[in-house]
Image: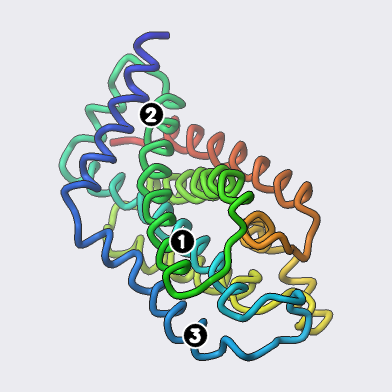
Amino acid sequence: MNAELQAIYVMWLRDVKLFARARSRLIANIIQPFFFLAFLGIGLRPMSLPGMPRGLSYLDFLAPGMIAMSVIFSSMFAGLSVIWDRQFGFLKEVLVAPVSRLSIVVGRILGGSTVALIQGLLVLAAGIALGARISIQGIIPALIFMLLIAFFAVGLGLSIAVRLRDPDAFPLLMNLIMMPSIFLSTAFFPLESVSDWLRSLMYLNPLTYLVDGLRGFLTGSSSIPLAADLAVALALCVSTTALGAYMFSKSEA
């Protein structure tokens, strides 16, 4: 048990140290959500979309979506480190260590989630600075929900990255998967404002529940019951962690 916990701690600490030394990564991952908030949020602030909750401006509505986007993209790209670890031989050393693959995956997920949470908090602070109204009572539950989002995204990113050997292919694949998923969530427009066929696609999109749940905690208004959002988030966390452990067990350095 001590060896397993130590492995989790070492993997977590390594990711946090790498993040602390790469300030350019921090800036790159928060600049896109910030510009969405600054230009879309403020520029379209007076606009009221069909289905938008009463009392919320567009900036208030957009801010949780941009926080979720920042957390998801930061978390997914944590998988890129696996490919580089394979290139430099570190992955081989990890895989032959006398610890379970689950410990390795959990440590990496915790490390990537810690980094993603920090970046999500910075986007949250930027949204508040720009004038987004956030529920003070909902901040603590929102932080917990942000961690669930990060766990899911890191686990998925690791599961995909462990099967790839080309570092250049991973960002392209992640953008191909994540950008349509972000736009098909409720990050940019309310669920109630779209046509029936598009709403059906959005209900099938896991990110819809993640973005909606975070918005529910931060603004007090959600399109889907928070209990359903939380249940989906927990199920996604468990499934991607299990998938990551399975993919690592089948991987070769």
The residue that label 3 is drawn on is 42
- Quick one: label 2 or label 3, which is nearer the N terminus? 3
Task: Please determine whether, in this image, residue 225 is positioned above or below residue 240.
Answer: below
From mark 2 to mark 3, how far is it between C-alphas?
42 Å
Residue 152, x across and y down, in percent: 54, 46
Mark 3 vs 1, N-terminal side: 3
Tell me, for residue 104, which label it has, or none: 2
Q: Nearer the viewer, residue 116 or 180?
A: 116
| Furthest-top residue in this view | 1
Residue at the image point whose x is 34% and y is 64% from the top: 29
Q: Position of residue 232 (x, y in %)?
A: 71, 48
Q: Locate the C terminus and report the quarter of the image it occupies.
A: top left
Quarter of the image for residue 173 reads bottom left
Q: Are marks 3 and 1 in contact (CB under 8 Å)?
A: no
Q: Earlier in the sequence, mark 2 or mark 1?
A: 2
Q: Which residue type does callout 1 highlight?
A: Leu
> Judging from the image, what secondary structure is the residue with disc 1 in?
helix
Residue 220: which quarter of the image?
Answer: bottom right
Are there few (<14), some (14-19), or many (20+) residues within 10 Å of tag 3?
some
Q: Which residue is mark 1?
A: 124
| Residue pictured at 65% horizontal, 54% vertical | 217
Crowding at dot 1, Cα within 10 Å, few <14 / some 14-19 / many 20+, comes out as: many
Q: Nearer the viewer's eye, disc 2 or disc 3?
A: 3
Q: Amino acid at mark 2?
A: Ile
Instruction: Kindly report the distance in space between the C-alpha atoms of the residues bearing marks 3 and 1.
Output: 15 Å
Q: Crowding at label 2, few (<14), some or many (≥20) Cα neighbours within 10 Å?
A: many
At horizontal 58% and vertical 50% (from top left) the residue drawn is 142
* Element assignment for label 2: helix
